Image: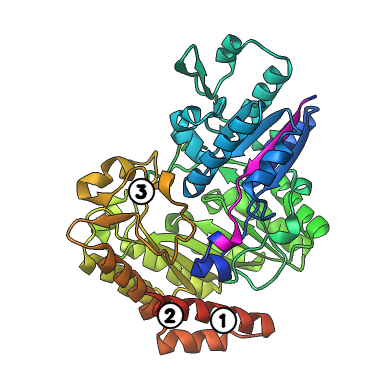
Amino acid sequence: MAKVLLVLPSIMSDENDGIVTKTTASFLPPLGLATIASVLRTNGHEVAIIDGVAEQMPLPQIVERAKQFDIIGVSAMTAHAKRALELIRMLKAETDKPILAGGVHATTMPHEFLEDGTDYVVIGEGELTMLDLTNALEADTPKEKFVEIEGICFMLDGKIVRTPKRPLIENLDDIPLPARDLLPMHKYSATIARTTRQPSHMLLASRGCPGVCSFCVHKLFGKHVRYNSPERIIEEFLLLVNEYGAKDVAIFDDNFAANKEMVAKVCNKLIELDLDLTWSIESRVDNVDRPTLELLKKAGCTFIAYGVESGSQRILDKMCKQVTLEQIRETIKTTNEVGIKTRGYLILGHLDESIEEMRQTIEFAKSLDLSVASFTLFVPLPGTLDYKRAHKFGTFDPDYYKKDLLLEYNMPKFPVYVPKGMTAKELLAIHREAYNKVYLRPKYIFKKLLEIRNIHDFMALVKGGLTVLNNFFRR
């Protein structure tokens, strides 16, 4: 039995003065680490998780605790890559324990982690690879034998070795439920824009996405969509309700609604159970139809977040979204008619996007009658098509993630990328204009006032309003 510590590196509250992240953002558990922990524990290993963000644990304290374990695994996403690399360097300097890194950023840029002291990088899905690595390390297997472990990258005789890709896990039900008991579950919540019912907890019902969006990283879970069974999804719903008191559940994977048969079975079972529960999903606009939306509504789904992205068809095509403005308009119109609240994720400043096209996006968002419009400035992520071609169309530093933490996506202080013919100041100004034009309209304010049903709705409106006003006066 090995003692394994899995770590989400810390972001301390005094580092983060982002308007959204401090007031209205979701605060979500690292379910990837919890699922890996569950697999390791099921196979006889002792596991602990440190969520450095939720627990507000400084890096030196994480390092001290790590000394008690045999193996240390660090999760890395692009937004916090700088912090993950800092932690790895500290661990390497102060311990002799094997250090493993995984997650979407480590999968995309494994050489950077190996250069900073990581012993093994997990490429892609982590559960079975982490189990194989843990078993091999516990058995004191010679390093040259690690070439037999699929899905890893490591240094051998001064050279980087990348082993064959590990096949994706086809039956997600084979993976045990995430080890939420190892997480501070009382600290997590969904954004008030999504629900005012707390506790609100999240689950993932599928992996993979068949989309080819130019701004998305597909290397972790691939393009082949795999689903948990309806029975397993319901089991997780009930766990969140019975063990953690959930009044709301947020399903955060991209393609839940695409499998109509699975959606119908989950919805019908939730209707039968008649739980005191609301829930929400994310979806592409081409994944739903009116019968599906009506069934979702009947089963308690109160909110759907859609990837709208742009109000310019040229930009949508450049993003490889494979949808039209009319499809977006019709899907959101139908969702509103059914009685489910809508959120639109929108991007400003994509590649060679003009100010005129950004204003088209703002006007399009206004016309859609969204419950929530989230405008983010375009960030080219490593491993995407946009990262490869961004320098052709604008100004950005490809090593940006090594120099700064990206703590605020919706109302950032600086743009990572600026299209040609535009300054950073102009881009920030039009971003602020987007929020002001959508949220400070009398029509929108009046609509939100009419939606108030209780003190929680009122407080959510106040917090949301203060967020927008703070953004208005900040820059």
Q: Is residue 249 magenta?
A: no
Query: Which residue lies at the image location 67% right of the left edge and 38% below the top edge?
Result: 6
Q: How is the image coloured?
A: rainbow
Q: Is residue 10 magenta?
A: yes
Left or right of residue 61, residue 321 in this image:
left
Answer few, some or many: residues within 10 Å of disc 2's Cα (few below 14, many 20 plus, some between 14 and 19): many
Query: Which residue lies at the image location 60% right of the left edge and 49% below the top edge?
Result: 261
Quick one: label 3 or label 1, which is nearer the N terminus? 3
Tell me the amino acid under the disc marked 1: Leu
Answer few, some or many: residues within 10 Å of disc 3's Cα (few below 14, many 20 plus, some between 14 and 19): many
Coordinates of residue 361 in the picture (x, y in percent): 31, 68
Left or right of residue 78, residue 49 in this image:
right
Residue 380 numbered mark, or none: 3
Q: Is 417 in front, or is 66? A: 66
Q: Are marks 3 and 1 in contact (CB under 8 Å)?
A: no
Q: Is residue 361 at all visible to an observer of this figure?
A: yes
Pointer 1: what residue?
461
Query: Which residue lies at the image location 55% right of the left edge and 29% below the top edge?
Result: 118
Where disc 3 sits, the SS reads loop
Which quadrant does the C terminus fall into? bottom left
Where disc 1 sits, the SS reads helix
Tell me the amino acid under the disc marked 2: Tyr
Q: Nearer the viewer, mark 3 or mark 1?
A: 3
Quick one: label 2 or label 1, which is nearer the N terminus? 2
Q: Quadrant of residue 345?
A: bottom left
- Reply above or below: 294 against 64: below
Magenta-highlighted residues: 2-14
Coordinates of residue 137 in the picture (x, y in percent): 68, 19
Rounded to the nearest whole Å, what is the CA distance between mark 2 and mark 3?
Answer: 27 Å
Pointer 2: what residue?
439
Q: Residue furthest left?
A: 421
